[in-house]
Image (cartoon, rainbow, N blue to C red):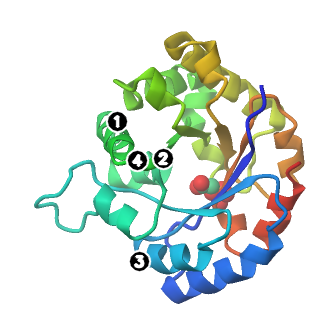
Amino acid sequence: MSRQPIIAGNWKMFKTGSEAKNFITELMPLVSHALARVFVAAPFTALQSAAQAAKGSQIVIGAQNMHDAVEGAFTGEISASMIKEAGANFVLLGHSERRQFFHEKNDFINRKVTRALSENLTPLLCVGETQEERDAEKTSKVLKTQLEECLSGVSNEQIEKIIIAYEPVWAIGTGKTATPEIAQEAHSICRDFLSKKWGRPVSDKVALLYGGSVKLDNIEGLMKMPDIDGALIGGASLQAKTFAQIINLVR
Ligand code: PGA
């Protein structure tokens, strides 16, 4: 089964609108022959300038979070239609930093997934275990529960539109990448779960990305694994040159 690889950057709380514009302008010519699809998750305030700069290129701009309601009295929150109008085509949901620092739970993330789908925004759903959960041999159970609860009510037709990122919490921003074998094992747990729930032909189409300290020197080993279809990259996505080098290593 061939799935087109995706390399997604997650800028987190870095880059203003003008910095985003400069970054995209620098990145575009560097990745014009890339085989991977290139995604960039920018801060809300940089979405519009990033999307404008990326016009006419294959770079897809997305947001890092959103609220599940259409609109309403939710001070400080951003809706799917606001994100879309700013030029985003995908949205990160359930990133471990949202879970950890902002106490987002699976049922809330599930409502966001549903909302994103109904507004034609591609959800990029993040799942992953903590170090304590891995040490207690709970990785498989944690991943299945996150997928079960975050994807509740998603139809056969919708699941194909979702991208999933396995991001072990212990590997995010720590420099401690999962080995290709550890990552593959987790990805195959996710793929099997999707297959049991939605059937093999459908689950074979879902892109599963790995995230957690992906860099120039580990991307190739990870991408060799059968169930790893790309990467979600934080720190190493902040410099256009480095990010482009990683993207261009994906064959
Ligand atoms: P990192 O972040 O590449 O800096 O570990 C990945 C992520 O949080 O998505």
Q: Are marks 4 and 1 in contact (CB under 8 Å)?
A: no
**Measured Cα–Cα span from mark 3 to mark 1:** 25 Å
Frontmost residue, 239 versus 178: 239
Percent position of residue 36, x then y:
77, 52
Task: Give whichever of discs 3 and 2 has the lower sequence position.
Answer: 3
Percent position of residue 104, x then y:
34, 46
Q: Which mark is residue 122?
A: 2
Task: Give whichever of discs 4 and 3 has the lower sequence position.
Answer: 3
Q: Vertically, is 88 above or below 136?
A: below
- The residue carrying pointer 4 sits among few (fewer than 14), some (14 to 19) or many (20 or more) residues within 10 Å by Cα, namely some
Q: Quadrant of residue 8?
A: bottom right
Residue at figure coordinates x 89%, y 56% from the top left: 249
Q: Amino acid at mark 3?
A: Thr
Q: Is residue 10 left or right of residue 71?
A: right
Q: Which residue is mark 4?
A: 120
Residue at figure coordinates x 34%, y 24% from the top left: 153
Q: Is residue 18 left or right of residue 113?
A: right
Q: Residue furthest front?
A: 56
- The residue carrying pointer 2 sits among few (fewer than 14), some (14 to 19) or many (20 or more) residues within 10 Å by Cα, namely many
- Label 4 element class: loop
Q: Which residue is mark 3?
A: 45
Q: Amino acid at mark 1?
A: Asn
Q: Which residue is mark 1?
A: 110
Task: Give whichever of discs 4 and 1 has the lower sequence position.
Answer: 1
